[in-house]
Amino acid sequence: MDYVILGASAAGISAAKTLRELDKEGSIVIVSKDDKTYSRCMLHHVISNHRTVEEINFVDEEFMKENNIIWVKGTSVKSLDTNSKKVILENQAIEYNKLLIATGASAFIPPIKNLREANNVYPLRNIEDAYNIKDKVKKINKVAIIGAGLVGIDALVGLLEYKNIEVSLVNTGQFILNKQLDKYSASIYENEFVKKGAKLYQGVSIKEIVVKDNNDVVGISLEDGNLVECEMIVVATGVRPNADFIKNTNISYDKGIVINDKCETTQKDVYAAGDVVGKNAIWPIAVKQGLVSAYNMYGKERLIDDSFTAKNSMNFMGIATVSLGMVEPIDESYKVAIRKDNNNYKKFIYKDNMIYGAIAQGDISYIGTITYLIKNKIEIENLENRIFDIGYADFLSLKENGEFCYNI
């Protein structure tokens, strides 16, 4: 086969789409454990019954057929033979010319006493997890979530839709989403979650999971002496790349498959993209890496731009937030400007007339301009005195033919 792609999520499908656009004739094979191409970012909507799995699919049902792609689904990769350029599956071997590893990651269950052995403990990583949680929540009164990153908050939002259960969130950090937000913007969401009925335990350490004799969960015992009662636990404490099958190859691994700016691994003709790389495990980055991989697999050079990977957008409880670049200054040479008004929050981190980070909550209408300025490292004259008034019009000019263009 000309191109073999391992994985049918964001990076894999992005690569397949791009390869077919570049190469109309080359053979493309996708191998995946999943038998559906759904958005993991939307699993909480399945939990809350707002959407079905079909409604969170991110490619059309006929995508594979229309693009003449062979999809080997419901199977796992056992090993790679990079000498003979073969992917070894459970029941067959597939030869490749160019290979993309986009196998994603699996939920990490931390080694907390009794957690891995307890009954009614679920991650939220795939559609089966969402179904398990949705089925169990109908039979219980109390549920707890461990972890307050994006997945943990997704789970919280989905579970708060159930009126008959008590939902608790256990967070070792001081505030939720501490990689994406600052304390103030996080507090806006925290207050809304509490109004909705959530119990938040933050800045705490977990001692152990309390279980019955039959290993059913009873609660989470905290180091401060509190007991968070629950009959089910959703674990959202990070992921580990799915890359066991690269053992006995020359593919380098360091908390994820190592790639260069072309998404090439250390093995010739083998590329990697998405969560399996182990860095910036968010959907937009996976899509971009898939695209870059496809270009280079085809032989048309394209580089991944790592200078601007920290971009997050979210909308919980009807409140939109976007964070870009730094959310806190990394040293005293950076300045911070903050404005709060009419339920809107703006925060900029800047230095020497350049913006290095921003948070916008509520009104995010101007965020496209700020994204452009940060990504392209644009220097803005007299920035400190006009930072809250920057808009598209400041950087647009009109060509003679009537076309608008950036004048920077």
Image: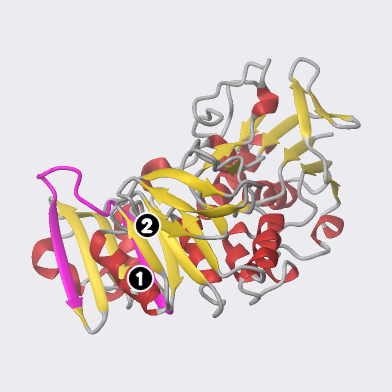
The residue that disc 1 covers is 189
Q: Quadrant of the N terminus?
A: top right
Q: Which residues are magenta?
A: 318-340
The residue that disc 2 covers is 177
Residue 84 vs residue 231, the one in the foreground: 231
- The percent coordinates of residue 365 (x first, y second) are 35, 76
Say if 184 sits above or below 250 in the image.
below
Residue 401 vs residue 154, the one in the foreground: 154
Say if 21 sits above or below 265 in the image.
below
Mark 2 surroundings within 10 Å by alpha-carbon count, few (fewer than 14), some (14 through 19), many (20 or more) = many
Mark 1 surroundings within 10 Å by alpha-carbon count, few (fewer than 14), some (14 through 19), many (20 or more) = some
Does residue 137 appear to the left or right of 326 in the view shown?
right
- The percent coordinates of residue 214 (x first, y second) are 66, 47
Does residue 163 appear to the left or right of 307 in the view shown?
right
Tell me what residue is drawn at x 33 percent, y 45 percent: 223
Amino acid type at circle 2 is Leu
Question: Residue 344, located in which quarter of the rendered image?
Answer: bottom left
Question: Which type of secondary structure does the marked residue at label 2 adopt?
Answer: loop
